[in-house]
Amino acid sequence: MTVQDLASNNDLKLLTEGLDLSAEITKPFCCDLLSIAMGKAPAGAAWVTVTVNTNTLAVATLTDVACIIFAEGCAVDSSLIEKAIEEEIPLFSTQLSSFDAAILAK
């Protein structure tokens, strides 16, 4: 599955239009604690979290995840979206639980 495949799911909203979505997703990864995600997020993962801040983007860059899915209806502000576009990190938002969002990325 690619990030583009994930973007076609109606339960997810792509927040970062115009990015390359061809990256392969290796597996879903759920974690809200950034220090754990920094050490355990596998490269190519679709990272599902409710932690919405710029540090999340920094961890995503360090771990080379394929995309981030913000679950549980978490609000994502425009400055974070702009920064993600600069860093070329695809972002999604969803009303789904973290568990249900992770299933979509499997």
Image (tube, rainbow, N blue to C red):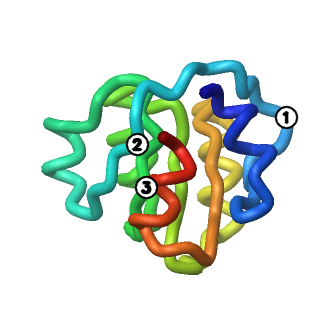
Front residue of 27 and 44: 27
Tell me the crowding category of disc 2: few under 14, some 14 to 19, or many 20 or more residues within 10 angstroms, Cα based: many
Give the number of the mark in front: 3 or 2: 2
In this picture, is 16 found above or below 41?
below
Does dot 1 land on a helix, a strand or a loop? Answer: loop
Q: Is 71 displayed left or right of 30 in the figure?
A: right
Which residue is at a point 51% across and 69% down the rendered structure image? 71
User: Label 1 to label 3, Cα distance in Å?
Assistant: 21 Å
Q: What amino acid is found at the position of numbered circle 1 in the picture?
A: Gly
Q: What amino acid is found at the position of numbered circle 3 in the picture?
A: Val
In this view, which residue lies farthest toward the right?
18
Does dot 2 land on a helix, a strand or a loop? Answer: strand
Task: Answer whether labels 3 and 2 touch (C-beta < 8 Å).
Answer: yes
* Location of residue 75 in the rendering, given as x and y in whole percent from the top left corner: 60, 78
Residue denoted by label 2: 28
Task: Answer whether labels 1 and 2 touch (C-beta < 8 Å).
Answer: no
Does dot 3 land on a helix, a strand or a loop? Answer: strand
* Location of residue 15 in the rendering, given as x and y in whole percent from the top left corner: 74, 55
Q: Is 15 displayed left or right of 83 in the figure?
A: right
Residue denoted by label 1: 18
Q: Quadrant of residue 34?
A: bottom left
Q: Quadrant of residue 5?
A: top right
Front residue of 21 and 79: 21
User: Label 3 to label 2, Cα distance in Å?
Assistant: 7 Å
Front residue of 67 and 101: 101
Tell me the crowding category of disc 1: few under 14, some 14 to 19, or many 20 or more residues within 10 angstroms, Cα based: few
Give the number of the mark in front: 1 or 2: 2
Which residue is at a point 32% across and 29% down the rendered structure image? 63
On residue 48, the disc is 3
Task: Answer whether labels 1 and 3 touch (C-beta < 8 Å).
Answer: no
Q: What amino acid is found at the position of numbered circle 2 in the picture?
A: Pro
